[in-house]
Image (tube, grey):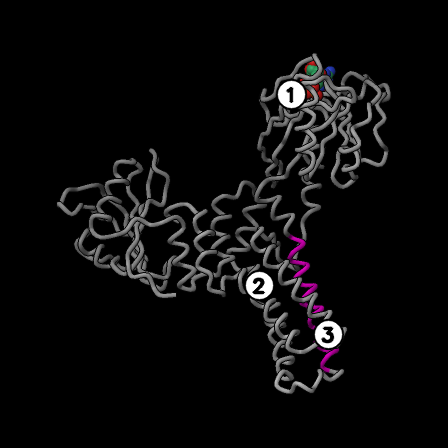
Amino acid sequence: MSRPSDTIAALATPLGTSALAVVRASGPDCAALASAILGATPPPRVATHADYRDDAGRLIDDVLVTFFRGPRSYTGEDTLEFSCHGNPFIAQSLLDDLLKRGCRPAEAGEFTRRAFLNGRMDLSQAEAVMDLIHARSERALTVANQQLRGSLGRHLDGLTESLLLVLARVEAYIDFPDEDLPTEDRAIVQAEVLGVLRGTERLLATSRYGELLRDGVKTVIIGEPNAGKSSLLNHLVGHERALVSAEPGTTRDFIEERLIVGPHCLRLIDTAGLNPTPATLEKLGMEKTLERAAEADLFLWVVDATRPCPALPASVSERLTPANTLVLLNKHDLLLGTPARAHPPASLPALEISALTGEGMETLTQRIVQHAEAFRQDQGEDLIAINSRHADALRRAREGLESARLILSTQGPVELLASDLRGTLDAFGEIAGKIDNERMLDHLFATFCIGK
Ligand SMILES: Nc1nc2c(ncn2[C@@H]2O[C@H](COP(=O)(O)OP(=O)(O)O)[C@@H](O)[C@H]2O)c(=O)[nH]1
Ligand SMILES: [Mg+2]
Protein backbone atom coordinates (compact mmCIF):
# COMPACT_ATOMS: atom_id res chain seq x y z
CA MET A 1 0.00 0.00 0.00
CA SER A 2 1.63 3.22 -1.15
CA ARG A 3 1.66 6.38 0.91
CA PRO A 4 -0.95 8.94 -0.11
CA SER A 5 0.68 11.91 -1.82
CA ASP A 6 -2.20 14.35 -1.58
CA THR A 7 -3.35 16.49 1.30
CA ILE A 8 -6.95 16.09 2.42
CA ALA A 9 -9.15 18.51 4.33
CA ALA A 10 -12.58 18.37 5.98
CA LEU A 11 -14.73 19.78 8.72
CA ALA A 12 -14.23 17.71 11.86
CA THR A 13 -17.33 19.09 13.56
CA PRO A 14 -20.96 19.26 12.33
CA LEU A 15 -21.91 22.24 10.23
CA GLY A 16 -24.03 24.36 12.57
CA THR A 17 -23.93 27.13 15.10
CA SER A 18 -21.69 26.26 18.03
CA ALA A 19 -19.00 27.73 20.26
CA LEU A 20 -16.21 26.32 18.14
CA ALA A 21 -15.74 24.45 14.89
CA VAL A 22 -12.74 22.39 13.85
CA VAL A 23 -11.34 22.05 10.35
CA ARG A 24 -8.48 19.73 9.74
CA ALA A 25 -6.06 18.76 7.02
CA SER A 26 -3.64 15.88 6.67
CA GLY A 27 -0.88 15.17 4.17
CA PRO A 28 2.52 16.29 2.95
CA ASP A 29 1.50 19.91 2.21
CA CYS A 30 0.45 20.79 5.77
CA ALA A 31 3.66 22.53 6.79
CA ALA A 32 3.71 24.63 3.60
CA LEU A 33 0.00 25.41 3.97
CA ALA A 34 0.51 26.65 7.52
CA SER A 35 3.34 28.88 6.52
CA ALA A 36 1.36 30.31 3.56
CA ILE A 37 -1.76 30.95 5.64
CA LEU A 38 -0.23 32.08 8.92
CA GLY A 39 3.11 33.46 7.80
CA ALA A 40 5.06 30.67 9.51
CA THR A 41 4.67 27.01 10.38
CA PRO A 42 3.79 26.98 14.07
CA PRO A 43 5.82 24.76 16.43
CA PRO A 44 4.40 21.22 16.49
CA ARG A 45 1.85 20.20 19.15
CA VAL A 46 1.41 23.71 20.50
CA ALA A 47 -1.89 25.52 20.12
CA THR A 48 -1.03 28.83 18.45
CA HIS A 49 -3.34 31.82 18.21
CA ALA A 50 -3.26 33.35 14.72
CA ASP A 51 -5.25 35.22 12.10
CA TYR A 52 -6.50 33.06 9.27
CA ARG A 53 -6.29 34.94 5.97
CA ASP A 54 -7.59 33.38 2.77
CA ASP A 55 -5.53 33.18 -0.41
CA ALA A 56 -6.71 36.69 -1.37
CA GLY A 57 -5.45 38.05 1.97
CA ARG A 58 -8.91 38.54 3.50
CA LEU A 59 -9.28 37.81 7.21
CA ILE A 60 -11.62 34.86 7.77
CA ASP A 61 -11.35 34.48 11.54
CA ASP A 62 -8.88 34.36 14.36
CA VAL A 63 -8.12 30.72 15.01
CA LEU A 64 -6.23 28.36 17.26
CA VAL A 65 -4.05 26.26 15.04
CA THR A 66 -2.18 23.10 15.99
CA PHE A 67 0.40 21.55 13.73
CA PHE A 68 1.34 17.88 14.20
CA ARG A 69 4.48 16.63 12.57
CA GLY A 70 4.11 13.07 11.21
CA PRO A 71 4.41 10.35 12.34
CA ARG A 72 3.32 11.77 15.72
CA SER A 73 -0.17 12.64 14.61
CA TYR A 74 -3.55 10.94 14.36
CA THR A 75 -3.04 9.97 10.72
CA GLY A 76 0.72 9.47 10.96
CA GLU A 77 1.16 12.30 8.42
CA ASP A 78 1.70 16.01 8.97
CA THR A 79 -1.66 17.38 10.06
CA LEU A 80 -3.18 20.76 10.81
CA GLU A 81 -6.14 21.47 13.06
CA PHE A 82 -7.86 24.84 13.00
CA SER A 83 -10.33 25.74 15.74
CA CYS A 84 -12.42 28.67 14.59
CA HIS A 85 -15.64 30.28 15.82
CA GLY A 86 -18.56 27.91 15.38
CA ASN A 87 -20.31 29.78 12.61
CA PRO A 88 -20.98 27.52 9.63
CA PHE A 89 -19.98 30.32 7.21
CA ILE A 90 -16.61 30.70 8.90
CA ALA A 91 -15.90 26.95 8.99
CA GLN A 92 -17.02 26.55 5.37
CA SER A 93 -14.93 29.53 4.14
CA LEU A 94 -11.92 28.13 5.93
CA LEU A 95 -12.43 24.72 4.34
CA ASP A 96 -13.07 26.29 0.90
CA ASP A 97 -9.83 28.20 1.23
CA LEU A 98 -7.89 25.00 2.05
CA LEU A 99 -9.41 23.36 -1.02
CA LYS A 100 -8.50 26.37 -3.15
CA ARG A 101 -4.94 26.04 -1.93
CA GLY A 102 -4.77 22.50 -3.29
CA CYS A 103 -6.25 20.23 -0.65
CA ARG A 104 -8.68 17.55 -1.73
CA PRO A 105 -11.98 17.06 0.16
CA ALA A 106 -11.54 14.06 2.45
CA GLU A 107 -13.69 11.03 1.89
CA ALA A 108 -15.67 9.42 4.70
CA GLY A 109 -13.28 7.96 7.26
CA GLU A 110 -10.22 8.93 5.25
CA PHE A 111 -8.26 10.38 8.17
CA THR A 112 -8.71 7.13 10.09
CA ARG A 113 -7.98 5.09 6.99
CA ARG A 114 -4.66 6.89 6.65
CA ALA A 115 -4.00 6.27 10.35
CA PHE A 116 -4.53 2.58 9.68
CA LEU A 117 -2.43 2.55 6.48
CA ASN A 118 0.38 4.32 8.31
CA GLY A 119 0.36 1.73 11.07
CA ARG A 120 -0.96 4.09 13.75
CA MET A 121 -3.69 1.57 14.59
CA ASP A 122 -4.93 -1.82 13.48
CA LEU A 123 -8.28 -2.24 11.81
CA SER A 124 -10.10 -3.23 14.99
CA GLN A 125 -8.87 0.03 16.55
CA ALA A 126 -10.05 2.01 13.53
CA GLU A 127 -13.47 0.44 13.99
CA ALA A 128 -13.32 1.33 17.67
CA VAL A 129 -12.94 5.00 16.69
CA MET A 130 -16.29 4.68 14.93
CA ASP A 131 -17.82 2.83 17.85
CA LEU A 132 -16.58 5.53 20.21
CA ILE A 133 -18.27 8.26 18.19
CA HIS A 134 -21.52 6.36 17.84
CA ALA A 135 -21.70 4.72 21.27
CA ARG A 136 -25.20 5.10 22.66
CA SER A 137 -24.48 4.06 26.22
CA GLU A 138 -21.87 4.14 28.93
CA ARG A 139 -21.06 0.44 28.48
CA ALA A 140 -20.72 0.80 24.71
CA LEU A 141 -18.22 3.59 25.39
CA THR A 142 -16.21 1.42 27.77
CA VAL A 143 -15.93 -1.36 25.21
CA ALA A 144 -15.04 1.03 22.39
CA ASN A 145 -12.33 2.57 24.58
CA GLN A 146 -10.83 -0.80 25.41
CA GLN A 147 -10.88 -1.85 21.77
CA LEU A 148 -9.29 1.44 20.78
CA ARG A 149 -6.51 0.70 23.23
CA GLY A 150 -5.93 -2.60 21.45
CA SER A 151 -7.70 -5.16 23.68
CA LEU A 152 -9.10 -7.21 20.81
CA GLY A 153 -5.85 -6.90 18.85
CA ARG A 154 -3.87 -8.25 21.83
CA HIS A 155 -6.12 -11.28 22.19
CA LEU A 156 -5.80 -11.98 18.48
CA ASP A 157 -2.02 -11.55 18.62
CA GLY A 158 -1.91 -14.19 21.36
CA LEU A 159 -3.91 -16.65 19.28
CA THR A 160 -1.89 -15.84 16.15
CA GLU A 161 1.40 -16.44 17.93
CA SER A 162 0.33 -19.85 19.25
CA LEU A 163 -0.87 -20.78 15.79
CA LEU A 164 2.40 -19.71 14.15
CA LEU A 165 4.33 -22.01 16.46
CA VAL A 166 2.03 -24.91 15.59
CA LEU A 167 2.32 -24.17 11.91
CA ALA A 168 6.14 -24.14 12.12
CA ARG A 169 6.06 -27.53 13.78
CA VAL A 170 3.70 -28.93 11.14
CA GLU A 171 5.49 -27.41 8.15
CA ALA A 172 8.74 -29.05 9.21
CA TYR A 173 7.20 -32.35 8.05
CA ILE A 174 5.77 -31.18 4.73
CA ASP A 175 9.08 -31.70 2.93
CA PHE A 176 9.13 -35.34 3.94
CA PRO A 177 6.02 -36.70 2.23
CA ASP A 178 6.48 -40.20 3.59
CA GLU A 179 6.73 -39.10 7.14
CA ASP A 180 3.75 -38.58 9.31
CA LEU A 181 3.80 -36.38 12.39
CA PRO A 182 5.46 -38.35 15.18
CA THR A 183 3.04 -39.20 17.97
CA GLU A 184 4.71 -36.82 20.36
CA ASP A 185 4.43 -33.85 17.99
CA ARG A 186 0.90 -34.80 17.10
CA ALA A 187 -0.13 -34.61 20.76
CA ILE A 188 1.47 -31.20 21.15
CA VAL A 189 -0.15 -29.90 17.97
CA GLN A 190 -3.51 -31.29 19.02
CA ALA A 191 -3.32 -29.56 22.38
CA GLU A 192 -2.23 -26.26 20.84
CA VAL A 193 -4.94 -26.31 18.18
CA LEU A 194 -7.52 -27.05 20.85
CA GLY A 195 -6.24 -24.11 22.90
CA VAL A 196 -6.53 -21.74 19.95
CA LEU A 197 -10.00 -23.11 19.18
CA ARG A 198 -11.14 -22.44 22.75
CA GLY A 199 -9.73 -18.91 22.58
CA THR A 200 -11.53 -18.33 19.28
CA GLU A 201 -14.78 -19.58 20.76
CA ARG A 202 -14.37 -17.32 23.78
CA LEU A 203 -14.02 -14.29 21.51
CA LEU A 204 -16.96 -15.43 19.38
CA ALA A 205 -19.09 -15.70 22.47
CA THR A 206 -18.81 -11.92 22.94
CA SER A 207 -20.63 -11.25 19.69
CA ARG A 208 -24.13 -11.21 21.19
CA TYR A 209 -23.08 -8.65 23.81
CA GLY A 210 -21.46 -6.62 21.03
CA GLU A 211 -24.71 -6.56 19.11
CA LEU A 212 -26.55 -5.59 22.25
CA LEU A 213 -24.18 -2.69 22.88
CA ARG A 214 -24.11 -1.43 19.29
CA ASP A 215 -27.83 -1.80 18.50
CA GLY A 216 -29.31 -1.50 21.99
CA VAL A 217 -31.07 -4.17 24.04
CA LYS A 218 -34.11 -5.21 22.00
CA THR A 219 -36.79 -5.25 24.66
CA VAL A 220 -40.25 -6.25 23.50
CA ILE A 221 -43.29 -5.53 25.65
CA ILE A 222 -45.88 -8.23 25.17
CA GLY A 223 -49.14 -9.18 26.83
CA GLU A 224 -52.91 -9.25 26.42
CA PRO A 225 -54.78 -6.14 25.27
CA ASN A 226 -55.37 -3.62 28.07
CA ALA A 227 -52.75 -5.10 30.39
CA GLY A 228 -50.94 -1.74 30.47
CA LYS A 229 -48.17 -2.26 27.91
CA SER A 230 -48.41 1.24 26.43
CA SER A 231 -48.68 2.74 29.91
CA LEU A 232 -45.44 0.96 30.82
CA LEU A 233 -43.63 2.29 27.75
CA ASN A 234 -44.86 5.80 28.49
CA HIS A 235 -43.75 5.53 32.08
CA LEU A 236 -40.29 4.31 31.15
CA VAL A 237 -39.67 6.89 28.44
CA GLY A 238 -41.10 9.60 30.69
CA HIS A 239 -43.66 11.03 28.32
CA GLU A 240 -46.85 10.11 26.49
CA ARG A 241 -45.43 8.31 23.51
CA ALA A 242 -47.99 5.54 23.02
CA LEU A 243 -51.73 5.91 23.05
CA VAL A 244 -53.19 4.63 26.30
CA SER A 245 -56.82 3.71 26.32
CA ALA A 246 -59.27 1.83 28.50
CA GLU A 247 -60.53 0.33 25.25
CA PRO A 248 -58.59 -2.83 24.41
CA GLY A 249 -56.63 -3.09 21.19
CA THR A 250 -55.58 0.56 20.77
CA THR A 251 -51.99 -0.21 19.81
CA ARG A 252 -52.18 -1.81 16.38
CA ASP A 253 -48.71 -1.06 15.10
CA PHE A 254 -45.59 -1.25 17.18
CA ILE A 255 -43.86 1.74 18.69
CA GLU A 256 -40.14 1.85 19.32
CA GLU A 257 -38.33 4.20 21.67
CA ARG A 258 -34.71 4.31 22.70
CA LEU A 259 -33.94 4.97 26.31
CA ILE A 260 -30.98 4.76 28.62
CA VAL A 261 -31.27 2.27 31.46
CA GLY A 262 -28.21 2.33 33.71
CA PRO A 263 -25.16 1.72 31.50
CA HIS A 264 -27.27 0.37 28.62
CA CYS A 265 -29.33 1.67 25.77
CA LEU A 266 -32.67 -0.03 25.33
CA ARG A 267 -34.72 -0.33 22.20
CA LEU A 268 -38.09 -0.56 23.88
CA ILE A 269 -40.81 -1.88 21.61
CA ASP A 270 -44.49 -1.63 22.48
CA THR A 271 -46.64 -4.07 20.58
CA ALA A 272 -50.25 -4.81 19.82
CA GLY A 273 -51.89 -7.01 22.44
CA LEU A 274 -51.74 -10.74 22.01
CA ASN A 275 -55.38 -11.67 21.96
CA PRO A 276 -56.28 -15.36 21.88
CA THR A 277 -59.33 -14.48 19.70
CA PRO A 278 -58.26 -11.48 17.59
CA ALA A 279 -60.44 -9.45 15.21
CA THR A 280 -59.12 -8.98 11.63
CA LEU A 281 -57.26 -5.71 12.16
CA GLU A 282 -55.92 -6.97 15.47
CA LYS A 283 -54.54 -9.98 13.65
CA LEU A 284 -52.29 -7.72 11.58
CA GLY A 285 -50.99 -6.09 14.75
CA MET A 286 -50.38 -9.47 16.28
CA GLU A 287 -48.41 -10.65 13.28
CA LYS A 288 -46.15 -7.65 13.65
CA THR A 289 -45.79 -8.41 17.35
CA LEU A 290 -44.70 -11.94 16.54
CA GLU A 291 -42.13 -10.62 14.04
CA ARG A 292 -40.63 -8.34 16.67
CA ALA A 293 -40.67 -11.11 19.25
CA ALA A 294 -38.50 -13.25 16.99
CA GLU A 295 -35.52 -10.92 17.44
CA ALA A 296 -35.97 -9.87 21.06
CA ASP A 297 -33.16 -9.91 23.63
CA LEU A 298 -35.61 -9.42 26.48
CA PHE A 299 -39.36 -9.80 26.90
CA LEU A 300 -41.36 -7.72 29.32
CA TRP A 301 -44.60 -9.66 29.64
CA VAL A 302 -47.18 -7.30 31.08
CA VAL A 303 -50.02 -9.02 32.89
CA ASP A 304 -53.09 -7.39 34.42
CA ALA A 305 -52.73 -8.66 38.00
CA THR A 306 -56.41 -8.07 38.74
CA ARG A 307 -57.62 -10.65 36.21
CA PRO A 308 -56.81 -14.25 35.39
CA CYS A 309 -54.00 -14.24 32.89
CA PRO A 310 -54.75 -15.60 29.43
CA ALA A 311 -52.30 -17.92 27.70
CA LEU A 312 -49.97 -16.45 25.07
CA PRO A 313 -49.86 -17.84 21.53
CA ALA A 314 -47.57 -20.86 21.48
CA SER A 315 -45.18 -19.21 18.99
CA VAL A 316 -44.43 -16.57 21.64
CA SER A 317 -44.64 -18.60 24.83
CA GLU A 318 -42.18 -21.17 23.54
CA ARG A 319 -39.57 -18.42 23.20
CA LEU A 320 -39.90 -17.27 26.80
CA THR A 321 -37.27 -18.50 29.24
CA PRO A 322 -36.37 -17.41 32.76
CA ALA A 323 -33.26 -15.81 31.27
CA ASN A 324 -34.99 -13.63 28.68
CA THR A 325 -38.32 -12.81 30.30
CA LEU A 326 -39.64 -10.68 33.12
CA VAL A 327 -43.31 -11.06 33.98
CA LEU A 328 -44.70 -7.74 35.17
CA LEU A 329 -47.76 -8.09 37.38
CA ASN A 330 -49.21 -4.70 36.53
CA LYS A 331 -52.00 -2.65 38.13
CA HIS A 332 -50.71 -3.70 41.54
CA ASP A 333 -52.23 -0.44 42.83
CA LEU A 334 -55.73 -1.87 42.29
CA LEU A 335 -55.12 -4.98 44.37
CA LEU A 336 -55.08 -3.05 47.66
CA GLY A 337 -53.29 -5.79 49.53
CA THR A 338 -55.30 -8.67 48.08
CA PRO A 339 -53.38 -11.40 46.25
CA ALA A 340 -52.94 -11.13 42.49
CA ARG A 341 -55.58 -12.95 40.46
CA ALA A 342 -53.23 -13.55 37.54
CA HIS A 343 -51.10 -16.66 37.70
CA PRO A 344 -48.46 -16.62 34.98
CA PRO A 345 -46.11 -19.64 34.74
CA ALA A 346 -44.22 -19.86 38.02
CA SER A 347 -41.01 -20.75 36.17
CA LEU A 348 -40.65 -17.16 34.90
CA PRO A 349 -39.34 -14.43 37.21
CA ALA A 350 -42.09 -11.97 38.12
CA LEU A 351 -42.27 -8.46 39.52
CA GLU A 352 -45.20 -6.44 40.88
CA ILE A 353 -45.50 -3.02 39.30
CA SER A 354 -47.94 -0.24 38.56
CA ALA A 355 -47.47 1.63 35.33
CA LEU A 356 -49.92 4.18 36.75
CA THR A 357 -48.23 5.01 40.06
CA GLY A 358 -44.67 4.03 39.11
CA GLU A 359 -44.48 1.38 41.83
CA GLY A 360 -41.74 -1.20 41.19
CA MET A 361 -40.11 0.77 38.37
CA GLU A 362 -36.77 1.10 40.08
CA THR A 363 -36.53 -2.64 40.65
CA LEU A 364 -37.61 -3.15 37.04
CA THR A 365 -34.79 -1.05 35.66
CA GLN A 366 -32.29 -2.87 37.90
CA ARG A 367 -33.55 -6.20 36.62
CA ILE A 368 -33.32 -5.03 33.00
CA VAL A 369 -29.67 -4.10 33.56
CA GLN A 370 -29.02 -7.52 35.16
CA HIS A 371 -30.52 -9.22 32.12
CA ALA A 372 -28.40 -7.20 29.70
CA GLU A 373 -25.26 -7.85 31.75
CA ALA A 374 -25.94 -11.59 31.68
CA PHE A 375 -24.82 -11.47 28.03
CA ARG A 376 -21.41 -10.15 29.02
CA GLN A 377 -18.43 -12.45 28.45
CA ASP A 378 -15.32 -10.91 29.95
CA GLN A 379 -11.97 -12.08 28.62
CA GLY A 380 -9.82 -11.99 31.70
CA GLU A 381 -9.30 -8.31 32.52
CA ASP A 382 -10.74 -7.17 29.23
CA LEU A 383 -14.31 -6.39 28.35
CA ILE A 384 -14.50 -7.38 24.69
CA ALA A 385 -17.56 -7.25 22.48
CA ILE A 386 -16.84 -8.08 18.85
CA ASN A 387 -18.81 -6.80 15.87
CA SER A 388 -20.32 -8.77 13.00
CA ARG A 389 -17.23 -8.43 10.80
CA HIS A 390 -15.05 -9.88 13.54
CA ALA A 391 -17.59 -12.64 14.16
CA ASP A 392 -17.60 -13.56 10.49
CA ALA A 393 -13.81 -13.90 10.42
CA LEU A 394 -13.73 -15.80 13.71
CA ARG A 395 -16.33 -18.26 12.44
CA ARG A 396 -14.05 -19.01 9.49
CA ALA A 397 -11.12 -19.37 11.88
CA ARG A 398 -13.17 -21.82 13.93
CA GLU A 399 -13.99 -23.85 10.83
CA GLY A 400 -10.32 -24.06 9.93
CA LEU A 401 -9.38 -25.19 13.43
CA GLU A 402 -12.14 -27.78 13.56
CA SER A 403 -11.07 -29.16 10.22
CA ALA A 404 -7.45 -29.26 11.47
CA ARG A 405 -8.56 -31.22 14.50
CA LEU A 406 -10.32 -33.72 12.29
CA ILE A 407 -7.20 -34.18 10.16
CA LEU A 408 -5.11 -34.68 13.28
CA SER A 409 -7.45 -37.28 14.75
CA THR A 410 -7.74 -39.21 11.46
CA GLN A 411 -4.01 -38.95 10.70
CA GLY A 412 -4.82 -37.06 7.49
CA PRO A 413 -2.18 -35.46 5.23
CA VAL A 414 0.10 -32.86 6.80
CA GLU A 415 -0.30 -30.55 3.76
CA LEU A 416 -4.03 -30.24 4.38
CA LEU A 417 -3.42 -29.64 8.04
CA ALA A 418 -0.99 -26.84 7.23
CA SER A 419 -3.44 -25.33 4.76
CA ASP A 420 -6.24 -25.24 7.36
CA LEU A 421 -3.92 -23.59 9.86
CA ARG A 422 -2.86 -20.99 7.30
CA GLY A 423 -6.52 -20.27 6.48
CA THR A 424 -7.15 -19.70 10.17
CA LEU A 425 -4.17 -17.35 10.40
CA ASP A 426 -5.59 -15.35 7.49
CA ALA A 427 -8.95 -15.09 9.21
CA PHE A 428 -7.28 -13.73 12.37
CA GLY A 429 -5.25 -11.35 10.21
CA GLU A 430 -8.36 -9.99 8.53
CA ILE A 431 -9.69 -8.70 11.84
CA ALA A 432 -6.62 -6.60 12.52
CA GLY A 433 -6.35 -5.71 8.83
CA LYS A 434 -3.03 -7.45 8.28
CA ILE A 435 -4.25 -8.77 4.97
CA ASP A 436 -4.55 -6.49 1.96
CA ASN A 437 -8.16 -6.17 1.02
CA GLU A 438 -8.91 -2.87 -0.64
CA ARG A 439 -12.61 -3.59 -1.18
CA MET A 440 -13.18 -4.50 2.42
CA LEU A 441 -11.46 -1.27 3.49
CA ASP A 442 -13.60 0.79 1.08
CA HIS A 443 -16.69 -0.83 2.49
CA LEU A 444 -15.65 -0.38 6.09
CA PHE A 445 -14.51 3.23 5.93
CA ALA A 446 -17.52 4.30 3.84
CA THR A 447 -19.60 3.94 7.01
CA PHE A 448 -17.44 6.53 8.81
CA CYS A 449 -18.24 10.22 8.94
CA ILE A 450 -16.39 12.72 6.81
CA GLY A 451 -13.66 14.44 8.79
CA LYS A 452 -12.93 11.37 10.93
N1 LIG B 1 -55.01 1.31 37.88
C1 LIG B 1 -54.13 1.09 36.92
N2 LIG B 1 -54.50 1.23 35.62
C2 LIG B 1 -53.59 1.00 34.67
C3 LIG B 1 -52.25 0.61 34.97
N3 LIG B 1 -51.60 0.45 33.81
C4 LIG B 1 -52.48 0.73 32.81
N4 LIG B 1 -53.70 1.05 33.33
C5 LIG B 1 -54.91 1.38 32.58
O1 LIG B 1 -55.27 0.25 31.78
C6 LIG B 1 -55.80 0.66 30.55
C7 LIG B 1 -55.04 0.04 29.39
O2 LIG B 1 -53.74 0.57 29.36
P1 LIG B 1 -52.82 0.52 28.06
O3 LIG B 1 -51.49 1.00 28.50
O4 LIG B 1 -53.47 1.19 26.91
O5 LIG B 1 -52.80 -1.05 27.82
P2 LIG B 1 -52.24 -1.86 26.54
O6 LIG B 1 -53.44 -2.22 25.74
O7 LIG B 1 -51.64 -3.08 27.15
O8 LIG B 1 -51.27 -1.01 25.84
C8 LIG B 1 -55.75 2.19 30.56
O9 LIG B 1 -57.00 2.69 30.97
C9 LIG B 1 -54.69 2.48 31.60
O10 LIG B 1 -54.88 3.75 32.19
C10 LIG B 1 -51.91 0.47 36.37
O11 LIG B 1 -50.77 0.14 36.74
N5 LIG B 1 -52.88 0.72 37.28
MG1 LIG C 1 -51.22 -0.47 23.88
Viewer-side residue, 341 vs 195 = 195
Q: CA distance from mark 1 to mark 3?
A: 57 Å
Q: Is residue 393 visible?
A: yes
Residue 72 spot, x, y in % from top left: 36, 62
Left or right: residue 311 versus residue 271 is right
Q: Which amino acid, mark 1?
A: Arg
Badge number at residue 427: 2
How packed mark 2 is, by other alpha carbons closer than 10 Å (few <14, some 14-19, many 20 or more), is many
- Looking at the rendering, the stretch of residues picked out in magenta corresponds to 185-206
Q: Earlier in the sequence, mark 3 or mark 2?
A: 3
Judged from the image, the secondary structure of the residue bearing numbered disc 1 is loop
**Quadrant in the picture for residue 19:** top left
Badge number at residue 408: 3
Judged from the image, the secondary structure of the residue bearing numbered disc 2 is helix
Q: Which amino acid, mark 3?
A: Leu
Q: CA distance from mark 3 to mark 2?
A: 20 Å
Judged from the image, the secondary structure of the residue bearing numbered disc 3 is helix
Badge number at residue 450: none
Ligand 2 falls in quadrant: top right
Magenta region includes residue 190:
yes
Mark 1 close to ligand 2, CB under 8 Å: no
- What is the quadrant of the N terminus in the image? bottom left
Residue that numbered label 1 is attached to: 252
